[in-house]
Image (tube, helix red, strand yellow):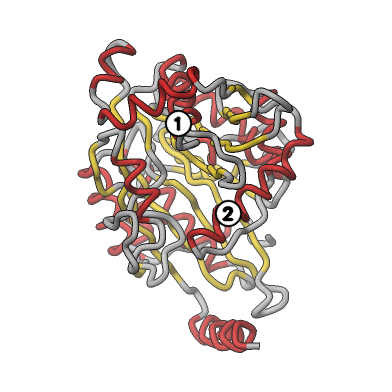
Amino acid sequence: MTTHPDAIKPNSIEACALEPYSIELCRTHDGSWARAESELSAAGIPLPLLQRSAWATALDQPQFLLCARAPGGRAVAAVPVTVTRTRALPGHRVWRAERVGAAAELQGLVAAIAHFKALAAAEPRVLCTELALFSLDGEVLRELSRAASQLGFLPEASPRGYAETSVVDLTGSEAEVLGRFHGTARRHIRAFERRGLTVAPITHPDRAAEMQTLVEETRRRTGGAAPRRPFADTIALANARPDLVRVVGVHTPEDGRLLAFACGHRQGDHVSYADAASTRAVRSGTPLGYGPAWALMHWARSLGATALDFGGITAGSHGDAADAVGGISDFKRHFRGAVVTVGSEWRFEPRPLRAAFAAGVRKLIGAS
């Protein structure tokens, strides 16, 4: 990135959105990201995992954080930006801001989004920007979506994230939480102990290959692609920061073979159910997803989280030909969470002709 943030000249709409906030560009290597994160946490805004300096450092990929500061220098919001190369147009980059929605002042977050757009427009090698908004508060999501539209972002035609999810209420006693589940979920959770299945944290990075194998098996059942996940880095981060990440697995009592796993990410005031997978090659006598999900809820409650975001849900059910993951959605519905809209994705292409050319190249690559 060559453009200095002080040299940016936003358009009139962006300039209005920025007032009276200033935007600090933060990196991990100089400690500015960690300092901004700490200030926001002290202000009652603990950032989602994907906006944490520990996550950025663990994944070791180009990233920066835009921190909005109110007059006087008080940190009020942040937008994390991940930079990736695109094969479609060598030398160009895609900037993606993920899970944007936490802020002490909503207008400060809008200012950071405006700066994100202006910074991309000023950087000649940015092909496009992707803005993934997220909030469990429907009104916050609507306000941010309106702001994104006014700033010139367009709705993403092919969003990468999920718009709807099941949010499980974790408040009250353990008995009260369990009591809100469907009887099927309670029965399968209790079956783990009876059948001698062990649910425990995964702490050794050398289990990453087994986890990837389970993901590939699970995706074959649902017909989806199985991207490579940085599981070794995720396990290492869970060991270093057990307050941010938890990885739990189901193991056979005889030889400790990994049969299933699930990852939990702390996202400020709640926890998200991230990657999860299981095998059907071994007969366990009970569905393998319930034990890890309940273990992550235990962990979430220990952190003071009040809800678990189940990582998306679809309207289909088991056997639905039009919904390959309908059976997984059935599993999530057994925990009787509230199905809510939490996300919307937006796109801005500062150089439309280049973006159109790159889209054509991607189609050719996909067809070859």
Q: Is residue 102 left or right of residue 129?
A: left
Within 10 angstroms of label 2, few (less than 14), some, or many (20 or more) residues?
some
Tell me: residue 356, above or below residue 109: below
Disc 1 residue type (three-letter): Ala
Q: Residues within 10 Å of mark 1 (few under 14, many from 20)?
A: many
Q: Nearer the viewer, mark 1 or mark 2?
A: 1
Q: Which residue is mark 1?
A: 293
Amino acid type assigned to the residue bearing label 2 in the image: Pro
Q: Position of residue 304 (x, y in %)?
A: 40, 16
Q: Quadrant of residue 85?
A: bottom right
Q: Which numbered circle lies on residue 5?
A: 2
Residue 124: percent from left, percent from top = 62, 73
Q: Residue at x 49, y 18 (%)?
A: 193
Quick check: 6 above or below 71? below
Q: Is residue 284 above or below residue 23?
A: above
Report the number of discs.
2
Secondary structure found at label 1: helix
- Residue at point 60%, 22% (across, down): 200
Q: Is residue 171 above or below residue 68?
A: above
Of residue 36 and residue 312, the one placed in the foreground of this image is 312
Residue drawn at x 56%, y 85% as measured from the top left: 363
Disc 1/disc 2 C-alpha distance (Å): 43 Å
Q: Is residue 288 left or right of residue 62?
A: left
> 211 and 62: which one is in front?
211
The x, y position of residue 129, in whole percent, is 50, 65
Q: Secondary structure at mark 2?
A: helix
